[in-house]
Amino acid sequence: MGAAGGDPQGVLVLCLGNDILRDDGVGWAIADELERSQVGLRVPSPESRVPGFESRAPSPEARPFVVKRSALSGFYLLDELAGWDRVLVVDAVHTGQHAPGTVLSFPFEALGTEAGPSPHAVGLPTVIRLGRQSGVPLPAWIHIVAIEADDMESFVEGLTPAVEAAVPRAVDVIRSVLADAPAPASAPA
């Protein structure tokens, strides 16, 4: 079962960002859209079920997922990831190699192993490597969906136009990745 009480057959969609740093809020905008479009697909946890209300079962090709927003980074991400078997991470990036609003999708392993500038600013690959070395129960499957940002430094709510226009594309990419996500490691073969 996921650390957040999610369905053990589900995937955590961890949307990172900060909605007051312009395009860094794209993860949260994507979380909003995923939640709006998830009506009828969500498999609620037993604690959240309303007596007398039957939710629609997901279609056979749909995979249940839990959306979570987080402004955490570095080693604090261990708390978000621990206990989940499968996680899709959504975040803004500023590589300068793509036009703002470009949606990138790749397996976690494609991130490489570059260390952060200090132990207080480490990237996801370092967090995962050190967490696994320490025995933290981390996901066996991690996928990244990143959106090339234009401005992640201005203290402004709202996305730049190119990044805002990318939100529906990113949601489509996420749904496609989730549809092809591997079965949980604990699922019967």
Image (cartoon, rainbow, N blue to C red):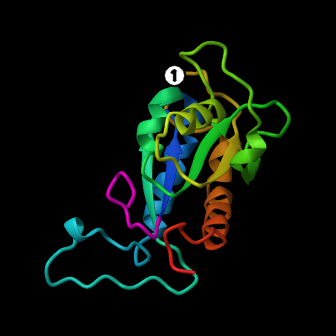
> Depth check: 185 or 118 in front?
185
Q: Which residue lies furthest to the left in this view?
A: 51
Left/right placement of residue 72 relative to residue 165 reads: left
Q: Nearer the viewer, residue 169 or 157?
A: 169
Q: Point out residue 24 in the picture as x, y percentages from the top left corner.
A: 57, 34
Residue labelled with disc 1? 155
Secondary structure category for the residue under label 1: loop
Specify whether 23 is left or right of 107: left
Residue at the spot 83% in from the left edge and 39% down from the top edge: 98
Quadrant location, the C terminus: bottom right
Q: In this view, does 187 lie above or below 90?
A: below
- The question of residue 108 being in magenta is answered with no
Image vertical order of residue 34 relative to residue 154, above or below: below
- Residue positioned 63% across, 68% down in the render: 181
Residue 105 locus on image (x, y percent) = 73, 53
Residue 76 occupies quadrant = top left
Quarter placement of the N terminus: bottom left
Q: Give the range drawn in magenta.
A: 1-10
54 to 74, vertically: above or below: below
- The structure residue drawn at horizontal position 66% and vertical position 65%, both measured from the top left corner, is 177
**Residue 26 occupies quadrant:** top right
Q: Is residue 21 left or right of residue 51?
A: right
